[in-house]
């Protein structure tokens, strides 16, 4: 049954509810005041005749005259109201028959969706993907993968969602299934190591470290594995090894690498000197310098970075490196000033400001 047919039935019912009382016959009304007067006169003439006050011929003539007036008065009293009521009923009927449907269509056209097609009942039973909860979608994908375990694409899509939900054991299972059905790669081994470490509350366990080492063996440039191996060294108390691992990772990284602020913050945490850009020669030379010379070199690098940011104030990664450098040098005032300068330079660009604030949180700076 179409929606329009339902609306037509509802409109017809409403019209019938209005018209039906108008078609009912009403009981005749009692006469008006003038007819009562004439009726009283007829009764009075009859009483006078019986009492002998008037003769029979005179009483008959009076009755005829009063009866004529009574009939005329009655017709005058009933004709006009009847016509008025009939006209009113016709007007209301026309309004009900035409006005109600037109009003209903006008309201629906403005507030409804007449241009949309019917939505089949079977389709209504299915929840749209946009409104379904993340857990419900995950359950659907998992049910699919239980029947189709070799669907590598499904496991790959499911893995980051499980990590986001904190279901690390299930994420490990998904990654292992990906490796089983699609083969071993450096990034898959690194992802597995990350899931193992996440399940251990961020501790790089031996099992996680083994996965990272296998990832580096497959690809020496695997960033995630190299970062976590540095983290493992820091957790073992080998801060110098952690700093060396992270400095090596930063030395060959592009300036706009999205992971660069995280590694720089980690390097600052273990007390390593900052890495400005890709100045490999200066970095290598700093290893053989005295503490005083190294500090002077770092100061020059920081000054060059600050000068460059005055020319290009939209370099969020550069601002984060400058803030971290001042923190390493123990200059808290300059670090705070750099944060203020960065926000002024970024202006109203909400995307860049969010990126800056996220990086500052990684550095341990929270407003």
Image (cartoon, grey):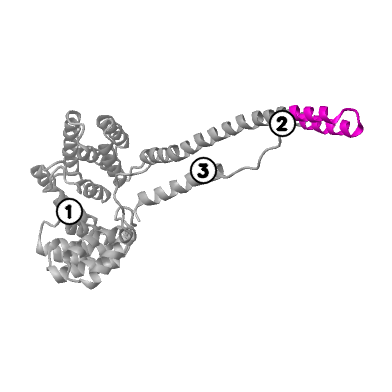
Real-space CA distance between mark 3 and mark 2, rounded to the nearest whole angstrom? 29 Å
Locate residue 357: give its quadrant.
top left
**Which percent across, then down, holds residue 48?**
88, 30
- Residue at image coords 27%, 69%: 143
Q: Which residue is mark 3?
A: 19
Specify the principal SS of the magenta part. helix
Q: In the shown orientation, is residue 188 left or right of residue 341?
A: left
**Rendered image quadrant of residue 302:** top left
Q: Confirm whether the magenta stretch covers residue 53.
A: yes
Residue in the foreground of this view, choosing between 84 and 279: 84
Q: Is residue 203 in view?
A: no
> Considering the numbered disc 3 on the image, is that residue within a helix, a strand or a loop?
helix
**Residue 196 forms part of the magenta stretch:** no
Q: Are marks 3 and 1 in contact (CB under 8 Å)?
A: no
Q: Nearer the viewer, residue 68 or 178?
A: 68
Residue situated in front as seen by the camera: 207 or 125: 125
**Residue pictured at 42% horizontal, 38% vertical:** 98
The residue pinned by badge 1 equals: 244
Give yes or no for contact between labels 3 and 2 (Cβ–Cβ under 8 Å).
no
Q: Residue placed at 33% from the left, 56% from the top?
A: 132
Task: Say few, some or many: other residues with alpha carbon within 10 Å of mark 3 (under 14 / 14 to 19 / 20 or more).
Answer: some
Residue ID for mark 2:
32
Secondary structure of the residue carrying numbered label 2: loop
């Amino acid at each position: 049954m179409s929606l329009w047919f339902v609306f037509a039935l509802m409109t017809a019912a409403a019209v019938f509810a209005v018209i039906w009382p108008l078609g009912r016959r009403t009981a005749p009304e009692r006469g008006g005041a003038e007819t009562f007067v004439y009726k009283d006169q007829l009764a009075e003439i009859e009483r006078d005749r019986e009492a002998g006050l008037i003769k029979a011929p005179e009483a008959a003539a009076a009755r005829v005259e009063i009866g004529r007036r009574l009939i005329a008065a009655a017709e005058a009293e009933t004709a006009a109201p009847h016509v008025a009521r009939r006209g009113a009923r016709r007007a209301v009927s026309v309004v009900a028959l035409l006005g109600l449907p037109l009003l209903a269509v006008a309201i629906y056209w403005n507030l409804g969706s007449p241009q949309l097609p019917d939505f089949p009942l079977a389709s209504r039973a299915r929840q749209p993907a946009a409104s379904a909860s993340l857990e419900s979608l995950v359950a659907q994908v998992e049910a699919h993968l239980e029947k189709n375990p070799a669907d590598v694409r499904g496991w790959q899509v499911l893995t980051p969602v499980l990590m986001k939900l904190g279901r690390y054991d299930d994420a490990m299972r998904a990654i292992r299934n990906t490796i089983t059905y699609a083969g071993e790669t450096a990034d898959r081994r690194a992802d597995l190591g990350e899931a193992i470490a996440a399940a251990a509350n961020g501790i790089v366990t031996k099992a996680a470290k083994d996965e990272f080492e296998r990832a580096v063996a497959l690809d020496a440039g695997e960033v995630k594995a190299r970062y976590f191996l540095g983290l493992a060294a820091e957790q073992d108390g080998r801060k110098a090894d952690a700093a060396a691992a992270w400095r090596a990772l930063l030395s060959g990284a592009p300036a706009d690498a999205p992971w660069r602020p995280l590694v720089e913050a980690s390097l600052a945490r273990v007390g390593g000197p900052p890495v400005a850009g890709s100045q490999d020669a200066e970095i290598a030379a700093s290893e053989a310098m005295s503490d005083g010379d190294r500090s002077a070199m770092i100061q020059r690098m920081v000054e060059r970075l600050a000068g460059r940011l005055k020319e290009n104030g939209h370099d969020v990664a550069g601002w984060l490196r400058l803030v971290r450098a001042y923190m390493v040098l123990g200059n808290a005032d300059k670090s705070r000033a750099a944060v203020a300068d960065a926000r002024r330079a970024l202006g109203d660009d909400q995307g860049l400001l969010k990126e800056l604030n996220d990086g500052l949180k990684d550095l341990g700076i929270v407003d």
